[in-house]
Amino acid sequence: MGIIVGTSGMQYEDEGDTLICGSTIGPSSSLARGSTLVQPSMKAARDHLATANVVDLFPHVLSVGGACGYEDVVNQGYGLDTAAISSVLFNNGQSCGACYEIKCVNDPQWCKSGQPSLFVTATNHCPPNYNLAGDNGGWCNPPNAHFDIAQPVFAKIAEYKAGVVPVQYRRIPCNKKGGIRFTITGNPYFNLVAVWNVGGAGDVIGLQVKGHRKLKWTAMKRNWGQKWETNAMMVGESLTFRVRASDGRYSTSWHIAPKNWQFGQTFEGKNFK
């Protein structure tokens, strides 16, 4: 089952900055037999300011694909409480899976009363548009911090007609149901592993794989978003995965894929708390 080494958890504190945020509408699972979490302390998340805008797209368009490599964010448990984030936040895909608390601020005409919080997961990239000024349409241009949020979700914090509102945001821990999922695709000579449903920090900055026979611990390389690649021979091995999150914690899911695993299958390991 699971062993937790270390007692200090992730801590978040308010320190009062602000940023602006935006909104855009923009196969079988096996349970892990064993996992280990190594959990050093982490202190994170001050408040920042950003912008947010709304774009009208059908829900099925919003949920499929994207720069993080999630195949279907609704079916994978993220729902539509997701955001496409600007390059400054996206960090070349490293921030995929990170969770944010967002509040509409400094705009009493459009912000919902009481400043309700919106909790979203970063599942896509909002690319820059250098044909437009950063304060007039080019909301995702560097160095802007910006969130594109689906219209039904955007409406939780601001009036739809506002289009773009200033927001205050901060990183928060991700609360996910079940374990970390590992979906293996590719072929015997090119393995691609999608890592999703990650709790805690939510994002993944490193992934290693190990077999039960010949395959020693092997570092995988980020292909794009949260898809990781290796040309090591994984076929025929019972696979163990070790995930490293941006808060410094590790989760090792021992032998979650049996030696007869097949491409296209998804396996479930121990999640971060």
Image (cartoon, rainbow, N blue to C red):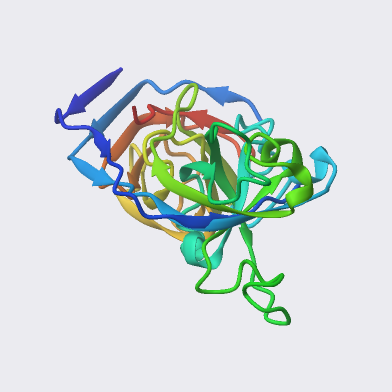
Which image quadrant is residue 159 in? top right
Which image quadrant is residue 243 in? top left
Q: Position of residue 7 (x, y in %)?
A: 15, 28
In front of the other: 177 or 31: 177
Answer left or right for 198 relative to 135: left
Answer left or right for 46 relative to 96: left
User: From where the camera sits, is residue 10 visible?
Assistant: yes
**Residue 187 against residue 74 in the figure, above or below:** below
For the point 63% across and 57% down, the residue is 67
**Residue 10 against residue 206 in the figure, above or below:** above
For the point 50% across and 73% down, the residue is 143
Q: Position of residue 226 (x, y in %)?
A: 52, 51
For the point 14% across and 31% down, the residue is 6
In front of the other: 191 or 98: 98
User: From where the camera sits, is residue 69 visible?
Assistant: no
Answer left or right for 112 relative to 271: right
